[in-house]
Amino acid sequence: MKAKEGVLDRLNDLLSAELTSINQFFLHAEMCRSWGYERLCEKIRARSVDEMKDAEELVKHILYLEGKPSMTLGKLTVGESVPDQFQVDLKLETDMLNRLRESITHCAKVGDYTTRSILERMIEDEESHIDWIETQLDTIKQVGLQNYLAEQIRKD
C-alpha cells in the first residue's frame, strides 16, 4: 500500500526519535547499574524496551506503506546524575509526544486513519513514561535525593 503525502517523512522522523530514546534510556540504565542503583536500572531499561517495541511497529508500518525505514539516530543527551537523567529523558519524551500529536493531525488531514490509529496507541506509552519521570522528580523533591537513591539500590 502506498503512503499518503507526508506520512513516510513523519514516520521516519518518529522512528529516528524512538531509536534515539532507546539508546539514551539504555545508556542511562547501564549508568544506574554501574552506580549500584539496580532497581532504577531495571525501570529505565524497561522504558528502553517499550521504545524498542514502538520502533519495531514503526519499521513494520513504514515497510507496509512501501517506504524505506531511516535508521538514523538523533543526538543523545547523557545525564551526569540521576536527576539530570530524568530531566533530559523528560525532554526527549515530551518532544516525542509533540511529534506524535503533529503526526496524528497530519494523518487525519490526509485521511490515513490506520497510521493515525497506530500513533494514537503510541501516545499512551509516551504519556505513561512522562508521568513516571515526573513522579520520580516529585519524589526526589519530597524525600530528598539521598533517600530516593537509597531506595533504588535493590531490585523490586
Image: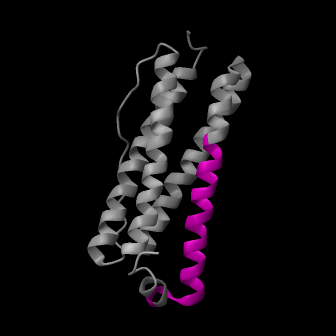
Q: Nearer the viewer, residue 97 or 118?
A: 118
At a point 58% along the width and 65% down the height, the residue shown is 132
Q: Nearer the viewer, residue 110 or 1?
A: 1
Asked if 92 appears above or below 82 in the picture, the reply is: above
Residue 5 position, x and y percent, is 60, 15
Residue 127 relative to residue 18: left or right: right
Q: Is residue 118 magenta?
A: no
Residue 126 position, x and y percent, is 59, 50
Res. 60 visible in picture? yes
Q: Which picture quadrant has residue 122?
A: top right
At a point 35% along the width and 32% down the height, the residue shown is 71
Asked if 143 appears above or below 17 in the picture, the reply is: below
At a point 64% along the width and 44% down the height, the residue shown is 123
Residue 69 position, x and y percent, is 41, 24
Quarter of the figure with the N terminus: top right
Res. 101 visible in picture? no
Residue found farthest to the top: 2
Instruction: Tell me the magenta residue range.
Output: 122-146
At a point 58% along the width and 40% down the height, the residue shown is 99
Residue found farthest to the left: 34
| Majority SS type along the magenta span | helix
Q: Is residue 139 magenta?
A: yes
Q: How is the image coloured?
A: one colour
Residue 35 position, x and y percent, is 29, 77
Q: Which picture quadrant has residue 141?
A: bottom right
Q: Which picture quadrant has residue 6?
A: top right
Residue 105 relative to residue 35: left or right: right
Asked if 90 appears above or below 118 in the picture, the reply is: below
